Image (cartoon, rainbow, N blue to C red):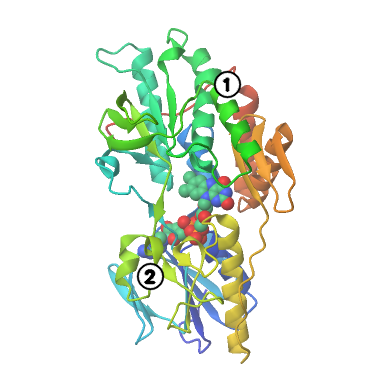
Amino acid sequence: MINPRSKRPRVVVVGGGFAGLSAVRELSVADVDVLLIDRHGYNTFQPLLYQVATGGLNPGDVTYALRAFTSRYRNADFLRATVTGVDTEQRLVQLEGLDPVPYDYLIIGCGVTANFFGIDGAQEHALTIYTRSGAIRTRDRILTAIEDAAQDREGAPDPTVVVVGGGATGVEMAGSLAELRNAAVPIAYRTLDISRVRIVLVEMTDVVLGPFHPQLQAYAAKELRERGVDLRLGTSVQQVREDAVVVKGPDGEEQTIPAAAVVWATGITASPIVGDWGLPTGRGGRIDVGPDLRVTGHPEIFAVGDVALDPENLPQVAQPAIQGGKHAGVQIRRLLAGSPTETFRYRDKGSMATIGRSDAVVEFPFGLRLKGLVAWLAWLGLHLFELMGGRNRLAALINLSVRYFSWPRSLNIVVGDPAD
Ligand SMILES: Cc1cc2nc3c(=O)[nH]c(=O)nc-3n(C[C@H](O)[C@H](O)[C@H](O)COP(=O)(O)OP(=O)(O)OC[C@H]3O[C@@H](n4cnc5c(N)ncnc54)[C@H](O)[C@@H]3O)c2cc1C
């Protein structure tokens, strides 16, 4: 808890994601007061949101109270507020509906949001799984469509789900949906013809999992197809409607695919509001930083994680955010000690993506590649290890176990009222 009369330098950290939390942790040993600000009262573990969207995990399994986090550190406090601007002259962070907060050092780690690339109807009708609420909305829409089809409600369309984007998020989402359809739905909905539950994965390029080795890309595509995913490579989305998506295939032909839900799993951009903060921005609206992660022209401000556009153009995934947040914390300690800042050196720990139960692909930077069960066990261990707090880890472990080991026998998913 920050003492209001404290004379210590104040570090404000905007965003309680991977980057922000890593920065707070690093600064816990510094002689500073740290104020963490987030528009939500909780941290979201985004890599498992697709599990929430497909009913495998509860929202509480992948979220963690930020106040519980800051209460672990004597020099840290939390404020739930939305940042609307930064007054770099007065060194104030402006907040929606609250007084501005002063800072001596500022670390911005406010992440990114979905980019719909201006595609007609996408913003309006597509679902996203970037946030807790987005994942819950997606889950409710999909499961309600299955329920309606099973009850043969008049006019209930086939519960087709179209996933847009064959990157890790799209592959994980499509694989998980295939599992829901193949393992759980036939038990829970005995009268539903499961061939009506179609899962279509649309990818503009000729491969899934673009950044992975071609062998792993081919493996993932084969596994998805074997699980009954209708994989459309070389296919781009032209329009998203309330009940359909219009795509253009490799032959240039347009086709309308009726869809109960369209899940947007491609493209990210900085929140448009960041562009109004008077800081230099570049590609994707991200904040320009130098090699030490300080914002160009603002030596007391760092930008870290997905929102930062660093000279190396690092991937927008968890590890650069975790390592970047830590680096910013270390640099502030150096500056307070009168030392110059250091260049950020990223340590690549590899990439992974799941395809379904007992199936994943993992690629390490030193050339080792894993697939299948062994890769999936590595994925499971890493994700549970990375989940914050013992409560989350235990709950996630229990719920994932239920999903993976008992789904064929039970389906216990609470579906919200679509009118809520
Ligand atoms: C569905 C999905 C799956 C993913 N899977 C993986 C994966 O398997 N492996 C992997 O490495 N990466 C994965 N990623 C990417 C990874 O989650 C991100 O790279 C990482 O979360 C970035 O961390 P961050 O701290 O920069 O931002 P975030 O984790 O997005 O945190 C940003 C925080 O800032 C807050 N915020 C935003 N704007 C404001 C504001 N104006 N005022 C106050 N607070 C604000 C938000 O509420 C949020 O808590 C996935 C991402 C998604 C969306």
Q: Is residue 271 left or right of residue 356?
A: left
**Dot 1 amino acid type:** Glu
Could you say where residue 376 lies in the image, as x and y percent from the top left? 68, 36
Residue farthest to the top, as pictured: 191
Residue contact between numbered discs 1 and 2, judged by CB atoms under 8 Å: no
Find disc 2 in the rendering and name its residue. 281
Which disc number belongs to residue 353?
none
* Residue 410 vertical position relative to residue 307 in the rendered view, above or below: above
Find disc 1 in the rendering and name its residue. 226
Queried on whether the Cβ of the residue with tag 2 lies below 8 angstroms from ligand 1, the answer reads no
Q: Earlier in the sequence, mark 1 or mark 2?
A: 1
Estimate the spatial distance between the alpha carbons at disc 1 and disc 2, rounded to whole Å.
43 Å
Q: Is residue 391 left or right of residue 8?
A: right
Examine the rendering and report whether any part of residue 109 can be seen. Answer: no
* Residue 228 vertical position relative to residue 217 in the rendered view, above or below: above
Residue nearest the observer in this picture, 9 or 70: 9
Image quadrant of residue 252? Answer: top left
In the rendered image, the quadrant that contains the C terminus is: top left
Residue nearest the observer in this picture, 409 or 298: 298
Q: Is residue 75 left or right of residue 153?
A: right
Queried on whether the Cβ of the residue with tag 1 lies below 8 angstroms from ligand 1, the answer reads no
Judge the density around disc 1: few (<14), some (14-19), many (≥20) Cα neighbours within 10 Å: few
* Residue 391 vertical position relative to residue 340 in the rendered view, above or below: above
